[in-house]
Image: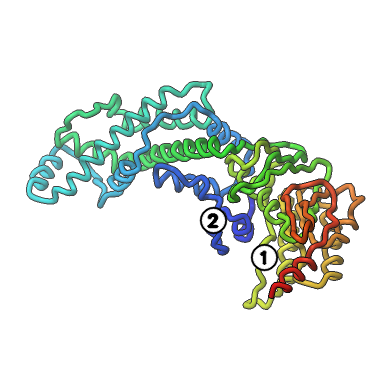
Amino acid sequence: MKVNWDNQTINDLGIIENRYEEKEIFSIFNATHSYGGKKILRKWITKPLNDLFILTKRIEALKSSTFFHLSIRNEELDFIEYYLNYEDKPTVYSRFNSFFMLLFRSSHNKSSRYVIERGIKLVTELLEELELAGQKITSDSPLLFQDFAQQIKNTLHFTELKELVPFRKNAKLNYYTIDYYDYLFRYKCHISLSNLLDIVYQIDAIHTIHQIAEKKGFSYPQFSSEKEFYLKDLYHPLIDKPVKNDWGINRSHICIFTGSNMAGKSTFLKAVGIAVWLAHCGLPVPASYMKCPIFDGIYTSINLPDSIKDGRSHFYSEVLRIKEILQKIREGKRCFVILDEMFRGTNAQDAFDASCAVNKILNNEDGSVFLISTHILEFANHFVNSSTCSFYYMESEIKDNQLMCSYKLKSGISETRVGYWIVKNELEQI
């Protein structure tokens, strides 16, 4: 089953191309050998799931060093796709028709014949390679690979393609055989061959993700049936020389983050959100360890725009965004939610009162997890004794008239106030 999300969330986290023109998370993994593998990867990273069985199967395959050994040759795979969809597919085959086609081809389009003959050669070689790879999969192999092997066996031995097994590699085929293969490949078995190509592309995506996870030191997420939620050595994967942090909650379901401007709160919240998103795609995460619950929805309110067209102020957009998320939760959805700098579009007193009102509502939604950042220290201190809330802050200080940010996460509530210093320091330079 798919996890619920929306465009605001996928833009805030920068999963794929977004309106902020930032580098996307997809680019980290985008190194497949084939265009089909790229499409598979894009499909996986844009469709988070809450089906534990599917996620576990995918993660098991990605972790395994026992791979299907296939030669992923993009140009040849592209040609196979081109051949299978080339012009009109033959709808009938007989030796009589093949004879007259031979006479026709002797005086007509030779390029068409080249496409057919090369396409048949490449398809046959691919089927042979898949047959051999599938035979090496055992009951000890990852379940996803076993599924691939069974699908290959079913296609090659229980469809019209069974007449081609065993394959005659490099055999010279007469025009009758060529026309018959063409009839099988492009008409009778077109869907079956497309499904086998999909396996090839999935294997390409799996190889690529595994290698990138190894290179970058990403780990594979674990899932908890309880409220346990913990990340070790987490960092934002698009930052050069990032500072790694540990974070977690257990009994509480609301986590309030404080800290000064530029201390790194928003970046850290995005890092957590990215890890949660990737985990629900069954992909490795930028942390040395992750354990989290399975969520039904992932929602963020980070770079929330106002709307001149709809006459919405930034403050009103925030209110509607929170209302929208709460409606999803009230439908019985277990959601992961990020609210970055709630109600920054209004005055300090209204922001305090509104934030407290929202937090009181969230106190009763203990099936979901809420990460809230704020500049309003009075808001955090107002709930300091609440059993539903935990508190973290990003360390910063003014030292020798310089703002020093370690980007290290610490437990508790920050008392640092540097907004006035930043304004004064910058404006004095004019």
Is 134 positioned to the left or the right of 294 in the image?
A: left
Is 141 positioned to the left or the right of 398 in the image?
A: left
Q: Residue at x 30, y 26 (%)?
A: 165
Residue 58 versus residue 12: which sits nearer the camera?
A: 12
Label 1, label 2: how many angstroms apart (C-alpha)?
Answer: 19 Å
Q: Nearer the viewer, mark 1 or mark 2?
A: 2
On screen, 176 above or below 341?
A: above
Is 103 positioned to the left or the right of 258 in the image?
A: left
Using the image, tell me which numbered label, if any, was put on residue 23. Answer: 2
Mark 1: give few (<14), some (14-19) or many (20+) Cα within 10 Å: some
Residue 316, how many percent across, how many down?
Answer: 74, 71
Residue extending farthest to the right is 385
Q: Secondary structure at mark 1?
A: loop
Residue 304 versus residue 366: which sits nearer the camera?
A: 304
Mark 2: give few (<14), some (14-19) or many (20+) Cα within 10 Å: some
Q: Residue at x 70, y 72 (%)?
A: 429
Using the image, tell me which numbered label, if any, was put on residue 371. Answer: none
Residue 349, how many percent across, how many down?
Answer: 86, 70
On screen, 113 above or below 430?
A: above
Residue 312 versus residue 150: which sits nearer the camera?
A: 312
Using the image, tell me which numbered label, if any, was put on residue 304. Answer: 1
Name the quadrant containing residue 1.
top right
User: Do callouts 1 and 2 mark residues in contact (Cβ within 8 Å)?
Assistant: no
Q: Residue at x 83, y 42 (%)?
A: 251
On screen, 254 above or below 135?
A: below
